[in-house]
Amino acid sequence: MHATRLIHLTGDAISLVLEPNGALPVWRHFGAKLGASADPLATPLVDALADAWPAAAARPLPPTILANDPPLTLLPIHGLGWFNQPALAGSRPASGGDLDWVQDFREDDLNWDEHALRIALSDDVAGLGLTLSYTLDPTSGVVSAWAEIENRADTPFRLDWLAAACVPLAPGMDQVLGFSGRWTLEFQENREPLGIATWRRDNRRGRTSHDSFPGVIVGSTLADDDGPVLGAHLGWSGNHTMLIEPLADGRRQLQIGEWLAPGEVVLEKGARYRTPTAYLSFSTQGLNGLSAGFHRFVREHVLAWPGGTMTARPVHLNTWEAVYCEHDPEDLKSLASAAAQLGVERFVLDDGWFHRRDNDRAALGDWWPDARKYPQGLAPLVDHVRGLGMQFGLWVEPEMVNPDSDLYRGHPDWAMQLEGRPLITGRNQLVLDLANPAVANYLFATLSVLLREYPIAYLKWDMNRDLASAGHRGRAAYRRQTEAYYRLLARLRDHFPALEIESCASGGGRADFGALQHTHRIWTSDSNDALTRIGIQRGFTRFFPPEIMGAHIGPADSHTTGRRHSMAFRAAVALPGHLGLEMDVRLLDADERAELTRWIALFKEWRGVAHSGTLRQGDIEPSLAWVQIVARDLGAALVTVYRRFESANRYIAPLLVRGLDAERRYRVKILHMPVAPHFAKPSGLLAALADEGVVLSGATLRDLGLPVPPLPPESAVVFSCVAVDD
Ligand code: GLA
């Protein structure tokens, strides 16, 4: 009956519509759900649309064009009339010049249902096979997409680019939110208008990187809670490319995939290359709606917890900023005892514990306890920590080797190198070639010895340099390295299923859904400066839920910025994440210890809500950032407001709390409010909020909001809302 039956994938709030045509399907829609969620007519409606407006009719052609002027497909390819960025680029080396640089695929097999599309195609002239897969998780609205190419001809095919996903952006989606950064300043948000030039970010550093997080958000206004936004992320811990290019019809295309070095992927006959998975989502409820979808997806489909479910996130003490590489077991025992008294639940022994590791110039690769510092091994310390009721965690950086190490002296050829090219060090270290089985086996064996010998609950897995000229037998090996890193993690998790792992790369240099499939926490940044952290954590939580966000209370004087902050500000900023301490807690006086103990107790009281609830964030004004997390059952909310800098406004506008049950009543309390010498004592509503609390309905909180007390710069106020049982 239908001339053109459209492919229609749909979830609770998103629709993807494509028009099949015997070749690569043409994009008709990627965005808001077409038809109401329970509307049985939605799919026939889309088909009716297709009958009335097949792709060709929907785009009447202007004069002076080629006879073939293809619209945007699932995988646009250069050479037969498509003049924009192709989603596939490659060729077949031959004497005198490459062949098969133009591809033209015919559909072999098309399978789709409401939630998934899989299409297999082939190009008999170029001798290639292609498979494209889009899977939609209906509740979170996140689409997982990948592409795979196969060389079916006798001679090798060299691949230069294959997008994992290529999707259209409707006209009007012309604002982009991208991310930049560096060490101690990751996930910095940049908003730019999209113009006629292509917007493009490449990462060639060989790890996810600090400066080009593989995620991008596009929208019309990029507002917190309203308006259409599309987010894309590549779940890959290596190189990547993201680009947004205007098309001649007012739309734009977004492509995302792995950046390949020259000759990095050369497919022999029968060989295949599958892209990393791209994750895309769409929301009509602004940036917070988009984040809620990504958080839900990560919780339900990315994270793989030991035992299948997340346990309450234990409070850490990480030793790095307390002792750096100066390890003495007796000293560390006293640090552990002091930490336990505050309520710490996991003691993580950072860098400095292994063979001759006195500073960052030597020892990486020699993963056994330093006999000078630990004459009886780690057992006395581990036993002490566990005797205090805490778990024990250990720092490692397995992918690296210092030239000054036994490992390098024994196996200089294990470091990645290109013959005839200089060996470039970073933090005095070289990268091991993990794709060499001897290297992977060594690392697996050495780490296994530690994991068997000691009851280690947690590894902080660090990675402290970019890859530079990453070579494996002369060929570029960024991809091989990333795959080998995943294999090593998987092998360890297989043998030690109770182990939790943190992904760290000089702070947040390896944060992506690929790493997160094998790990359970991301060390967000080496900056524990609370002011800096507000922005870092905002960018991070656009894609990642707060329970995997390592967030530590550092010393009063930040080690990375030198700025000084109150305990309350440091704690309130770290509160929604996976809390830890990164300081020598023995140096605190009695009042500070008591205050820190209270904040840790508060974290424990609220982690259940914060780590499963719906997070929203925004600004009251540029100087005032807020984060709200509403419990899954809408029974409670944790609300924080952070004053970044002074503002000329005398009063602060009320903070609207959205997402609670409008009909229910909540007792609202101020859990922490700063004081300054010239501040008046709180009176009226503020005093009541700070005392017994005030009962307000969800509707009042949503429409009238909460009064925000005066806040000095670099301070915070924390509210709780708890449903009152009638
Ligand atoms: C990196 C990490 C830090 C710490 C040091 C140890 O910089 O990000 O947290 O572990 O290495 O050398």
Image (tube, grey):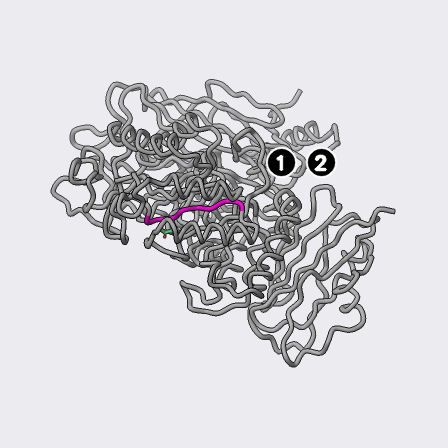
Q: Does any atom of ligand 1 lie closer than 8 Å to the CB of label 1?
A: no
| Front residue of this view, candidates 255 and 313 | 313
Q: Name the residue under label 2.
A: 35
Q: Badge 2 local density, few (<14 within 10 Å), some, or many (20+)?
A: some
| Type of amino acid at the residue the image marks with label 2 | Gly
> In this rendering, would 621 be left or right of 524?
right
Q: Badge 1 local density, few (<14 within 10 Å), some, or many (20+)?
A: many
| Front residue of this view, candidates 175 and 714 | 714
Name the residue: 65% across, 64% down.
Answer: 717
Name the residue: 40% across, 46% down.
Answer: 349
Instruction: Estimate the x, y position of residue 4 in percent, counting from the top left.
Output: 60, 25
Whole-Å distance between the Cαs marked 2 and 1?
9 Å
Q: In which quarter of the image is the N terminus?
A: top right
Q: Which of marks 2 and 1 is nearer the N terminus?
A: 1
Q: Name the residue under label 1.
A: 15
Res. 22 visible in picture: yes
Dots 2, 1 in contact, CB < 8 A: yes
Label annotation for residue 341: none
Instruction: Estimate the x, y position of residue 462 in percent, counting from the top left.
Output: 37, 45
117 over 191 or under it: above or below: above
Instruction: Estimate the x, y position of residue 365 in percent, counting from the top left.
Output: 26, 40
| Type of amino acid at the residue the image marks with label 1 | Ser
Instruction: Read off the magenta span.
Output: 345-352
Name the residue: 59% across, 56% down.
Answer: 597
